Amino acid sequence: MTTTQTTKVYIIDDHAIVREGLKQILADTPDITVAGDADTADEALILARQQAYNVLLLDITMPARNGLDILKQIKKESPTVAVLMLSMHDEDQYAIRSLKAGAAGYLNKQGAPTELVDAIREVAAGRKYITPALAQTLANQVSAKNAIAPHEELSHREYQTMIMIASGKCVSDIAIELDLSVKTVSMYRARLLQKMQLKNNAEIMRYAMKNSLV
């Protein structure tokens, strides 16, 4: 008789509704169980250090400290941990950055429940999980590896600021959403303008639209 090994999952997301929704999806999957959940970066790191799990589901947009920063800290402390990033953002915005930072996979929250289950099983088995669309994006990047786009040189916060500006948000709105000071967001804006050799928000918007980032 074969015994099925249970995959233990931690869920890190600041939205209670999302956490409960994920729990309900996984409750119907016999080989996956939710071992714990958290809604802040500090709690996420505490849970991660316990390592009483196989897969950590981590939201990329967390208050005070974003998911990519948390991911990098977790991978620094526990390099073998399987982290599956969850996001409302399209893959072409954050998926590749997540994989480069050490994520085992990237999943859009709007995906089907079966996709979530498949992704958890894949990363729990020590494999990477990427969608066909992301695989094509990665293939395109390999083909054009010598042509690095300007936005690929940005830090995560600079890139995040660029996307939000391109979406029509002002510095004060971005500061509130990211739980940062207006001065800090203005600094990120200044840095990205300099790195990308752009002059103003209008040029940021044009660049983002031209490169299908928004």
Image (cartoon, rainbow, N blue to C red):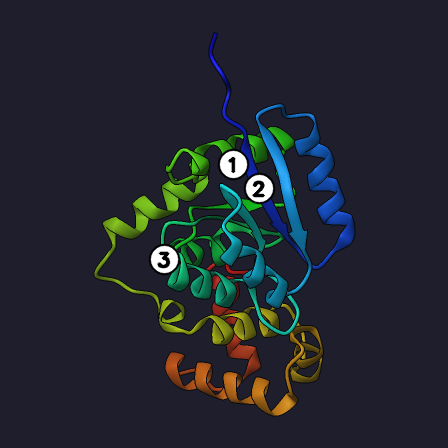
Left or right of 205? Residue 63 is right
The kind of residue tagged 2 is: Val
Q: Which mark is residue 54?
A: none
Tag 1 near tag 2, CB within 8 Å: yes
Give the number of the mark in front: 1 or 2: 2
Residue holding disc 3 = 100
The residue at which mark 2 appears reads as: 9
| Quarter of the image where one finds residue 154 | bottom left
Per the image, the residue denoted by label 1 is 120
Q: Looking at the image, tell me whether mark 1 or mark 2 is earlier in sequence order.
A: 2
- Between marks 1 and 3, how big is the CA–CA gap? 19 Å
Q: Position of residue 202 (x, y in %)?
A: 56, 78
**Distance between the Cα atoms at labels 1 and 2?**
8 Å
Q: Provide the secondary structure element on which disc 3 rests.
A: helix
In this view, which residue lies farthest toward the top? 1
Q: Is residue 108 above or below residue 149?
A: above
